[in-house]
Amino acid sequence: MLDFVDITKDNVHLHCRFDKDFENELDKFQNKIYPDNSDFFTVLISNGLLRWSYLFYGGKLIGAIWLEKEHSCLPVATLGIFIADKNYRCKGIGERAIKEYIARNKKDLKLKEVNLQVRKENIRAIKCYEKCGFAAEKEYELSNGQRVIDMSKSV
C-alpha cells in the first residue's frame, strides 16, 4: 500500500535518514533530494507553492515526492521524486506515486503543466516518467558536464 505523509516542521528530521542511510545509492541518480527551497518549506506550503510528502510503502518509509511552483500565479510546477531504498525500485511504485500525487495536488496548486529534470543516464527514471505521460523537451549539458533532459506533461 502506497501512502503519502506531508512533511512538516515536526517530521522533517526523517528526511535526513535518506542522506545517511542511502547516500551511496542516491548519489548515482540524484542531483538533489530536496525541493529548491527546503529551508523555507513551511512558508512555501502556506503560500501554495509547495507540496512535499514522504512516500511510505507497506508502512515503510522509502522516499519522498514534491511539487514546487516558482510563482503562485503560474499553473506550472516542478516534480521531484526519489525512492531511496533500491528494494522498492522497478516495481511500478514511482509511476503510481507520480500519477496519484499530481492528481491529488492538481486542483490546490492550480496546475496545468508539470515539469522535471532528469539525468540523461538515468534510463530507469526516464522510462518511468514516460509511462506517466512526460515527454522530453530539450537536452543539454550543465556547467559540471552532466547531460540532462527537461521533460514536461500537461495535466
Image (tube, rainbow, N blue to C red):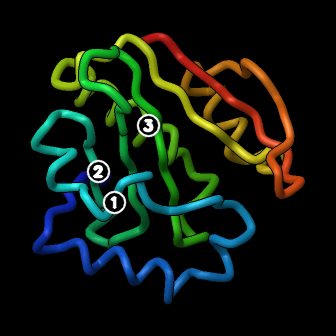
Q: Quadrant of residue 108?
A: top left
Amino acid type at circle 1 is Ser
The mark nearer the N terminus, 1 or 3, is 1
x, y percentage for residue 41?
Answer: 24, 55
The mark nearer the N terminus, 3 or 2, is 2
Badge 1 crowding class, 10 Å Cα cut-off, few under 14, some 14 to 19, many 20 or more, is some
| Residue under pointer 1 | 38
| Residue under pointer 2 | 52
Looking at the rendered image, the disc whose residue lies closer to the viewer, 3 or 2, is 2
Q: How many marks?
A: 3
Along the line of sight, which residue is nearer the eye, 1 or 62? 62
Q: Residue at x 46, y 38 (%)?
A: 79
Q: Residue at x 46, y 23 (%)?
A: 114
The mark nearer the N terminus, 2 or 1, is 1
x, y percentage for residue 127?
Answer: 71, 36
Q: Indicate left or right for 82 with 103 as reference.
A: right
Q: Are marks 3 and 2 in contact (CB under 8 Å)?
A: no
Amino acid type at circle 2 is Trp
Instruction: In the rendered view, tell whether residue 148 sits above or below residue 8.
Output: above
Q: Are marks 2 and 1 in contact (CB under 8 Å)?
A: yes
Residue furthest to the front: 143
Along the line of sight, which residue is nearer the eye, 121 or 128? 121
Instruction: In the rendered view, tell whether residue 12 sits above or below residue 56.
Output: below
Q: Residue at x 10, y 43 (%)?
A: 46
Amino acid type at circle 3 is Ile
Instruction: In the rendered view, tell whether residue 108 sits above or below residue 25.
Output: above
Looking at the rendered image, the disc whose residue lies closer to the viewer, 2 or 1, is 1
Q: Quadrant of residue 53?
A: bottom left
Give the distance between the C-alpha atoms of the residues marked 1 and 3, in whole angstroms. 20 Å
